[in-house]
Image (cartoon, helix red, strand yellow):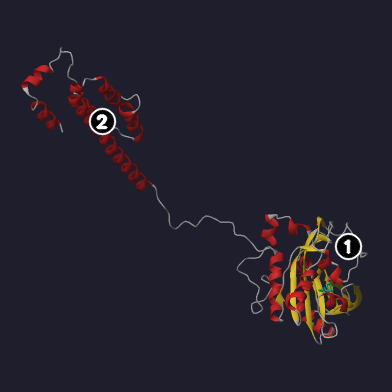
Amino acid sequence: MIRRVRLRFAAIAPNERRKNQPGKANKQVDYAAIGREAVSRIQSADDLGSLESLRVEFLGKQGSVSGLLKTLGKLSPDERKDTGPKIHALRESVTDALALRKQALENAELEARLSSEKLDMSLPAPESAPGSIHPVSQVLDELAEIFADLGFAVASGPEIEDDWHNFTALNMPESHPARAMHDTFYFPDAAPDGGRMLLRTHTSPVQVRTMQEQGAPLRIIAPGRVYRSDSDATHTPMFHQVEGLVIDRDIHLGHLKWTLETFLKAFFEREDIVLRLRPSYFPFTEPSVEVDVGYSREANRRSVGGSGDDPGHDWMELLGSGMVNARVLEMSGLDPNEWQGFAFGVGVDRLAMLKYGMDDLRPFFDGDLRWLRHYGFSSFDQPTLSAGVGARA
Ligand code: 2NL
């Protein structure tokens, strides 16, 4: 480098050399020397910070090389022809040196990091918070699994209903107390037929819609969220229900009893389930029966099953059911002289509490992670009839 500059200096013609003698009007500036000095300082910068300071010093807005470039504008064309290339060469050598040194310093920094940082491949992976399946979801899956095995399809429908599908079609007249404002959440807008829109109070409207759309025969369950204007220790404004409906030509109460018995034995995973059917009343079934399950009280803990003759044995009301009211069939578009069937309804949250031992309904819907970690299910434990529907049973 130095040799090249000397050669260039030697190449200047003698008259030219004379013209540039010190003391003359345009005194010779040794741009090559300035460049050598700058490049040498750049090459000895020992970190990226001081390299950046040098860049600013030379090439920044107020930088020395930038300053030299600015002087070009004030020179005569002749002077510019001579000085221009020198200043540009200076700028280029400074720019190249900066880039070269920057690359070198960055490489050194990376080398240092690679040799000092150690990655211990034998360390355990950081803990990740696994999610869990809510008991209600788990029970809904179990119900779908059990009833699928009995030939039931899962039906679904809107949670925002009109009052015809929620009440009228289910033989609940205008005067029925369940239709009162203090029991049902109504929307301010009118339904298409002029009635009111509401949050469904049961999943029965799903069954009505399915009868209308698919006709008979039919074997469905309708699980889902339902809403009632009710809130205390045992009632939440939203809860879960599953209803079942079987329509065929010769369905009778015997089919209902066998179906519920088979369902409850599979759900609670025990054979000693005893059922008691009591006459009851629902507007949508006739006759209507309430289904109680026998249970024994051992140390205040409920366990389903046992015999009605045991001391300390009691009955627990669990399901409502009956033969579908002929008027409901008719309103759903089925001929009651050709078709008949049974229906039942049960609270999913209550089923979950009984099976998995929760004693309070309200935490179901609080979203408290501590509760979910305690009562939740692993997503790997899918309920199946062969492996057992209760993931933790
Ligand atoms: C309960 C139990 C019940 C039904 C629901 C039903 C549905 C249709 C036709 C006839 Cl589409 N019945 N569902 C039947 C009996 C009981 O629910 O405790 N409800 C208050």
Disc sitting over residue 126 in the figure: none
SS state under label 2: helix
Mark 2 or mark 1, earlier in chain: 2
Residue 115, above or below 54: below
Circle 2 residues within 10 Å: few <14, some 14–19, many ≥20 = many
Image location of residue 124, percent across then percent down: 49, 57
The single residue placed furthest to the top in the displayed view is 23
What is the C-alpha distance between the residues marked 2 and 1?
A: 88 Å
Amino acid at pointer 2: Arg
Instruction: Give the quadrant of residue 256.
Output: bottom right
Q: Nearer the viewer, residue 259 or 192?
A: 192
Instruction: Give the quadrant of residue 9.
Output: top left
Quadrant, the C terminus: bottom right
Quadrant, the N terminus: top left
> Ligand 1 closer than 8 Å to the CB at disc 1?
no
Q: Quadrant of ligand 1?
A: bottom right
> Is residue 238 toward the left or the right of residue 48 in the image?
right
Query: Badge 2 is on which residue?
Result: 91
Query: Badge 1 is on which residue?
Result: 179
